[in-house]
Image: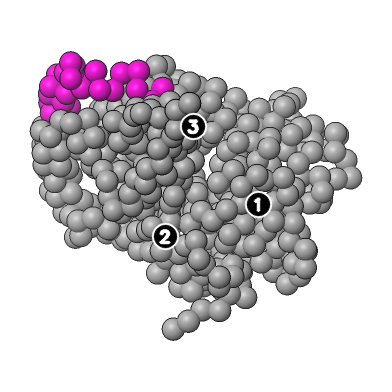
Amino acid sequence: MSSTIEDEIVRDVLQRHQGLVKRIETKRRGRVSIEAEKDYIVEIALYLRDKRDFSQVVSATSFDAPDGDSYAVVYCLWSLSHRVLLALKTSIPKEIPRLRSLTPFFESANWHERETHEMMGIQFEGHLDLGRLLLPEDWTEGFPLRKTFRLQG
Amino acid sequence: MSSLLRVNWGPQHPITGHLRFILDLDGDIVVNAIPEIGYTHRGIEKLAENRNYLQVVPLVERVCNIDSFNVSLGYVMAVEELMGVKVPERAQFIRTIMAELGRIMSHLYWFAIFGVAAGLFTLIMWPIADRELFIDLAEMVVGSRVTYSYFTPGGVFADLPDEFDKRAAKTLAYFERRIGEYEVIFLHNKLYQLRTMHVGVLDSRKAIELAVAGPSARGSGIRMDVRSDEPYAAYDQLDFEVPVEDSGDACARAKIRLREMKESVLLVRQALNKLPEGPIRVRVPPILPREDAYSRVECGRGEFGIHVVGQGSDRPYRLKISTPSFRNMSALPHMLKGARLADLPIIYHSMDIWPLDVDR
C-alpha cells in the first residue's frame, strides 16, 4: 500500500496530538490543513518543525470568523524537504484576542505576526517587538482589517 | 569607546526605493539596520473586500506592477480553486507564456536598477531598452503595456494574435544573443565582480530560517521553486531547469536571475510549440463559495501567495497577499549587520525587493 507524505503527516499528527486537533485534511497534493484549539498551536507547530521539517512560516493572516464571536488565525508553514504547505488554523475569542506567538521558535513568523497584530489587533504573546510595521507611527484609528473598521467615503 | 552614529536612510528614494532604514554606523560599518516600511501602503487587502472578484484582478496587479502577469495569475488561480473551475489547456499554456514574459520583464527591470547600485550606468540603459521589446509583445496580446488584467477567472480574455509566434520568435532570438552579451560585458566584468562577490553573503541555513524567497533563496543553494514544487498552469508539461548557486552572495543572486531569463526564453519557445487548440476561457459562477483557498505562484521575485476567503457573495471576504519582497525585506536586518554602508544598495537590490510589493 502506498501512502503519500501528506497522509503520513496527517497520521502522525493525529496519533501524537489526538484530541487537540479539531479538523485535519489534505485537499490535494502538497497541501495539508490542520485546525486546532488556540492553546495547542505552538505545540503542534513545534512538533511539525522538528519531525517534519516545517521550518518556515511563509504567511500568517487573520480575519473575522463568520460565526461573529471570534477571529480566525491562519499560519502557512512550508516544509522544504517534503515540499508540503501546511495551513495551521485556529480561532480566538474576540473579547480576548490573544495567541501565543510563534516568533520565538520561527524567526520567519516575526513580520507576519507584526502585520497581523497591527491590522487585526491580535496580541501575540511572547513576541518581542509588536511595533508598527506598515501603518503610520501616529495611527490611532484602530485595526483596519477588522470588519468593524469604519470606512469613509 | 567608539560611539555609534545614527543615520536616517530614506524614505525619498535614496537608490533603495520608498522605504527608510534607520542605521547605526560605526565608521562606515553598519552595526544595526532597522527597515521602516509602509510608505507605499495602499491597503489593497482592504480595498479588495469592497469590490467584486473580477474588479480585484486589476487591483492585485498593483501589488507588483512590474510583474503583473504573475501576480494576477496567483489571484485568479485562488479564485478558480474556490469555484472548482477547470481552466482549458490552451489558456494554461497562454498563461505560462505570458507569465514567463513577465518574469523576463521583471528580471530585466531588476538588472537595470542593480546596475545603478553597482555603479555601472550602462547597465540601466541596456536592460530597460530590451524590456521594451517584451512590453511590445505583451501590448500586442493584451493592448496595454504594464498592467494587463489579462488573466481572468476561467482563462484569459483574448487569444494570441496570429502574428504573435513570429514576433515572439524574433524577440527571443535577439534576446538570447543579448543575454550572452550581458554576461560578457557585465557579469565577467572585473568591476562588477569586485562590487558583488562576497558581498551580502547569506548562508543556506539562515536563508531557510528567515524564509527568504525566490531567486534570492536559490542564490543561497536552496532548491525551491513553486513552478516545480507545486506545478501550476502548464509547467508540469514543460521541461525547465531551476538554477541554483551556492555562494550566497550578491553575485550569485545576480547569476541566478540571468540564468532564469535563459530558461524563460526556452520555456516560452516550448510552450509556443506545444500550444494546443481549443477554448481559451470557461464560464465561471458569479459568487465565491464559503471556503478559503491559498494559491502560490513563482513571481520574478519569488513565491507569491494569495489567500482568498469567500463568503457566499461576489466579493472576497478577506484577501491576504504574502509577497516575496516582504519576506526578503525581513531578512535584511540580518544581512546588513557588519556590511559597509557603500554596499547597502547592492545588498538591498541583490534581494530584488520592490517596496510596492512589500507594503501592498
Who comes first in sequence, dot 2 or dot 3? 2
Residue on which disc 2 sits:
B41
Query: In the orientation shown, which residue stands out farthest toward the bottom?
Result: A153
Disc 3 chain ID: B
Instruction: Please say whether residue B263 is visible from this viewpoint.
Output: no
The amino acid marked with disc number 1 is Val
Q: Which mark is residue B334?
A: 3
The amino acid marked with disc number 3 is His
Say which quadrant the C terminus of chain A sits in: bottom left
Residue on which disc 1 sits:
A74
- To the question of a shared chain for discs 1 and 2, the answer is no
Percent of width and height locating residue B44: 44, 63
- Residues at marks 1 and 2, CA–CA distance in whole angstroms: 22 Å
Report the span colored magenta.
B177-201
Helix, strand or loop at label 2? It is loop
Percent of width and height locating residue B80: 49, 57
Q: Quadrant of residue B166?
A: top left
